Amino acid sequence: MKKTWWMPIAIVAIGLGLVGLSMDESSVQEATIQKTVFHEDSLPLDYWDKPQAMGKVHAGLENNMRPEACAQCHQEQFNAWRDSKHAMAYSPGLVGQFPNMGHAAGNDCLVCHAPLAEQLYRDAGDLDATLSTLLENPEGFSRAADLDSTKSQLPLRHAGVTCAVCHVRQGQRFGPPRRGSDVVGHLQGDAHGGFVATKDFEKSQLCAACHQFPQAYAINGKPLENTLFEWKKSRFSREGVQCQSCHMPDRKHAFKGIHDVDMVRSGLEFKLKKQGKLAILSMTSVHIGHAFPTYVTPKIWVKAEALDAQGKVLQHWQWVIVREVAYDDGWKEIQDTRLMPDESRVFVADDLNEHVKSVHFYVDVVPDAFYKDVYRSLLSDDLQPKARLLIAKALSDADKNDYRLYENEIKI
């Protein structure tokens, strides 16, 4: 049996320099009062050091780090974020694994899934309490941005990757320059005492802290998540197309990716043709600035069926687009058949039966294929009752994410 994926996760986190530490209250307060030094045209060098202490979470609207508080003035950004994977980063499939790992190892995972110091577990009791809370509140925030809602009183970790994760350091706000302006540095304003504007928020490097794993822990020469390096090797980097260009168009905070069928379709081009006794489907990555898919979790199935005049299947073919890895006394890469930027792949239905009248092609996406295998493996082992409920919910939710990306038929 393949061993579950979380076993070496602490090693990965250490390599990233993002290790989550269990901090007591005094440590958080001490970190909070430290002054951040920055150059006016860039982010502070320690901006992505983890964990980051934000200060008091519920101390008036100006100092409230809840996303609902930010929504009082930034409603458009909140409405996009609330449906994003960032908002769901503190997920049942993640947390359901923590009881077997312990709260300290769980904190190593939270450095990307809930990175603020105030979001970390203080002790084992903190972790145990969150199991029931997450079962009762799959969404860790008020969708209506109601600050009086009981959901707005949940521990901040339940809100996942919140506004403050990217925009607040020691009480100071950071963000891109104002629309239509190139002015950077500290800009005066009535809210929050102004903010620090930097073009770093419009650069791909901003995303690297959680979306680029270290080369030191590469599998077959490639980190588990290698998105920034894949992008740097592509023409998109040379042309100045940043991560934000596609995943945050017009500064929208939806962060769409592999789970969004329209997003994926917009990045690919399909052509289906007949050539003699062959039916050929070509797939080209035309607007994707990294490998498709970039991570090890999704799997894309390409299938073809040869049909007779009555629609009976006479022949069938199947191909997979995936980076498949497994952990068994060390990580191993089983196969890597992903598409690189601008790469084309052809899928050929050949040696067609003489009774074949048409060939039907399908492309199906399983965004959480690797995770689903992990969840099934965990459910076959001993789990605490609440952890089992969380993992079962995660598997059920993941099954709903599968979708058909492409379907077409050609007459023979």
Image: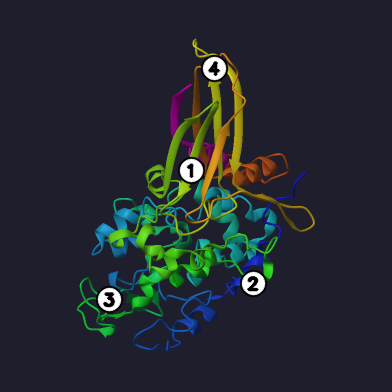
Residue holding disc 2 = 15
Residue holding disc 4 = 356
Q: Is residue 65 magenta?
A: no
Position of 92 with respect to 272 (left or right) is: right
Q: Are marks 3 and 4 in contact (CB under 8 Å)?
A: no
Residue holding disc 1 = 283
- Between the residue at mark 1 and the residue at mark 4, the CA separation in whole angstroms equals 23 Å
Identify the element where label 1 is drawn: strand
Identify the element where label 4 is drawn: loop
- Between the residue at mark 1 and the residue at mark 3, the CA separation in whole angstroms equals 38 Å
Residue at the outermost top position: 310
Mark 2 nearby-residue class (10 Å; few <14, some 14–19, many ≥20): some
Residue under the point 43% across and 38% down? 271
Q: From the viewer's side, name the closer residue of 257 and 265.
A: 265
Q: If you read the primary sequence from the N terminus, does the residue marked by circle 2 or circle 1 appear first?
A: 2
Judge depth for marks 2 and 1 and give the one in front. 1
